Amino acid sequence: MPATLMDGKALAERLRGEVTREIAALGHVGLATVLVGDDPASDVYIRLKQRAATEAGIDARDIRLDASTSEDEVLALVHDLNDDAEIDGILVQLPLPSQIDETRVTYAVAPHKDVDGFHPVNAGNLYLGTPLHVPATPAGCMALLAEYGVDPKGKNAVVIGRSEIVGRPAAMLLLQAHATVTICHSRTADLAAEVRRADIVVAAVGVPGIVTADMVKPGAAILDVGLTRTEEGIRGDVDPAVADVAGLLTPMPGGTGPMTIALLLESAVKAARYRRGLLAYPTL
Ligand code: GUN
């Protein structure tokens, strides 16, 4: 029997409806997105995020800076946004042009406004099992698992990729949900053997079709986060034939992508609650 598709688009729509109502109740939620340069993929992501935020009733500020902008200029902008009473959440789209140190910019965002969850305070709290702001893509994966009745407790979960945006936080969230977690990466000796033991797979390396049907345990839940634009169209990390073996599979597109946007909006609401003292954000 072919895998059930995990409909990220439908779940994201439902979550966005809930977020819209929460924003209306809060009155005002301000989100600033910052895009430096003209990377076409980043431009698409920012457009999607801006549109979704505006549709949900967020006061969304779309800040675009020239590709030649200096690190000091970006840091000055981030500091201004940190101090801006109209802004609850800040998102600096990655990657940044090579003259800018991403780590310095990530550290500069006030942790309670860091809707991406990339600041070390937020990453550290996730590591410690006390999550505050959590990266949207792995949070979306967890929401999809919950929606489709997959409890990670006691399951073998394999995360392919160790990026700070997806792989590492996905592993931490699965661990917090009591899965037995393995993180695979480019130096993993036998990827197929690791994946074969997995009840849950999160594939996030950006290598089209790296997860093939012969690697997958029958009935496993497979979340495809990788996205590569090829001449034949958008390809995920998971080969489409995996649908013949898996129990649950995210479609590509329409799986994890829409969830990332929905969870970002949830994060913006959370940031607004932190700023209003409706939710406690621990300070150092
Ligand atoms: N680049 C790729 N994914 C993301 C994301 O979730 N947030 C930001 N800020 N940049 C990204």
Image (tube, rainbow, N blue to C red):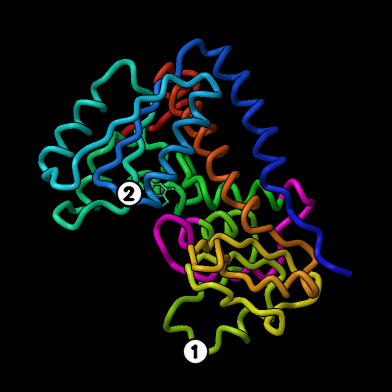
Residue 71: tell me if it is visible: no
In magenta segment, residue 228: no
Q: Which residues are magenta?
A: 146-169
The residue that appears at 81% across and 59% down in the rendered structure is: 4
Left or right: residue 146 versus residue 87 is right
Alpha carbons under labels 2 and 1: distance apart? 30 Å
Left or right: residue 14 versus residue 133 is right
Which residue is the extreme one toward the front? 231
- Position of residue 222 measured from the top left corner of the image (x, y, whole percent): 68, 65
Three-letter amino acid code of the residue under disc 1:
Ala
Per the image, the residue denoted by label 1 is 189
Q: In the figure, 272 relative to 41: above or below?
A: above
Q: Which mark is residue 120?
A: 2
Three-letter amino acid code of the residue under disc 2:
Pro
Q: In the figure, 143 relative to 73: above or below?
A: below
Q: Which quadrant of the figure contains the C terminus?
A: top left
| Mark 2 C-beta closer than 8 Å to ligand 1 | no
